[in-house]
Amino acid sequence: MNLIEDSWIPVQRESGILQNIAPWQITERDDQIIRLSAPRHDFDGALVQFLIALLQTTITPQNDDEWLEWLLTPPSPETLKEKFIAYQSAFELAGDGPRFMQDFDALDGEEKIISGLMIEAPGGRTEKLFLDHFIKGGSYNGLCQCCAATALFAMQTNAPAGGVGHRTSLRGGGPLTTLVIPDVEAEESLPDTLWTMLWLNVLNQKSVENLTGNVELKESAHIFPWLTHTRTSEAKTGQSTTPLDAHSLQMYWAMPRRIRLVMDGSEHGCCDLCGAEDQALITHYVTKNYGANYDGAWRHPLSPHYQDKKTLEYLPMHAQPGGLAYRYWLGWTQGDGFYQPAKAVREYLDVEGKKTKHEILRLWVFGYDMDNMKARCWYEKQYPLIVIENEEQRQLFAERVQAMLDLATQLAGFVQSCVKEAWFDRPADARGDVSFIKEAFYEQTEAAFIAMLHTLQSNTNREVIQQWHSQLAHHSLKLFDYWVAQGDMASENPRRIAEAHRKLRNLIYGKKLLAKVGIETKKGVAVA
């Protein structure tokens, strides 16, 4: 199967029809393609990155004008096919030559069941010790070529720690991805098509040249690492792969794992994942350790980054237990010194967003929460993406949002500590993780936060912070009452609960806290 020519990408058309298409069909005008429809959410996340990577590699716009022209008037399928075909030799899934996302050489490594390509698959030791209670090994014994290709790309893109020498992805295990997408529910929005979603995240030529990587390396193998022998990373004889050793575009096609699909064509039947019939089901793959070890100051354009406090280097963000709370929204979209948004997001807000003023946009955030080798959860969420053209207003908007987030962080901590004081005589000695209280706080106040973002877009007056404080105060006291009621009735102490409640109110309306965010007080009551 060739991933340029053959129909393998599952999509939904405007009419609701579900089918597989070739990549160059994404701009078909009759019954337009509106979204991906893979059998797993993480596969949708992998496929959207595959298509962005393909567009970025083959038809990078020369400047912003060309980018905008193609956003509003997409190239024809024939044009895309002509551009893509030039790279088709790099996208063969099987055969004697280079194979897509697979080791250049035949491997003599360990043969594994194909289900091992799934991020959540238990490791070999886990299965041997019968510890795979919740996620069983061998859940998928045979995959069609379409699902196998997607699983392969997803693994290389998200690769977690996998034992000695089994390298993580260029962005670490289970990186967070943030994409600009149209708000399909808004009255004034860009077209609800897959093309729009993809093209909003494509950079122009100048931006690509400014990415980390060595654009002087012109050979195809510097972009697609499977076109040559693997740059292995054994302790004594191997080497790391730094931005000096690969073209910038290799970030989209990074291949840390040494994998070869077993493609003998002996298995016929239905795919255990999507149910499609295939004459050449893939049941096994071979893997070997010490693949490419991506090291150094790589800055992937589809991931937000944070600054490491010790090294001061910027590292890719990852999902954390508790989900994708709005407390990271400013870092994902505007940046705040400690966090930096994905380059694709920042480029849109800084450049393209000023030229297309009519649309309402959203930010699609997704990624795995990984605990070393173990996938704890797949998270994805959408948030508003606020476009503010005036630089001064944009700065003031960011300051107000930061004040809102600081206030929410403070009150979330107050609620958690006061609930513990209501539950226990000696809360400092109480064992157990109570972070779910903070998580509930952010979940309960998210709708209010989003409403405040839209208010701030047109009104950055300080009074908005007071409105936000009122909302947080209401939810804080409500959540306190709820969680206290969930405690152990046998050990309830009414006096202890009343004191904890009084303390929470005093903390919420404390003059020091309110002064910090610029809210004046009068007789203990917050005023603008």
Image (cartoon, helix red, strand yellow):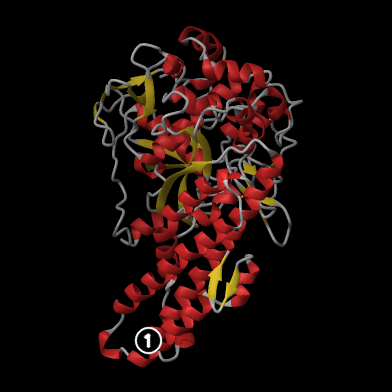
Quadrant into which the C terminus falls:
bottom right
Q: Position of residue 425 (x, y in %)?
A: 41, 91
- Residue that label 1 marks: 497
Q: Quadrant of residue 271?
A: top left
Q: Between 107 and 503, which is closer to the camera in this rendering?
A: 503
Q: Between 469 and 499, which is closer to the camera in this rendering?
A: 469
Q: Position of residue 402 (x, y in %)?
A: 61, 56
Q: The disc labelled 1 sits on which kind of residue? A: Ile
Secondary structure found at label 1: helix
Above or below, 65 against 398 in this view is: above
Write the residue at 32% across / 29% down.
144
- Horizontal arrangement in the rendering, residue 213 relative to residue 407 (left or right): right
Write the residue at 50% across / 27% down.
198
**In this view of the protein, can residue 288 be seen by the observer?**
no
Q: Position of residue 210 (x, y in %)?
A: 73, 32
Above or below, 108 against 276 in this view is: below
**In this view of the protein, can residue 349 be seen by the observer?**
yes
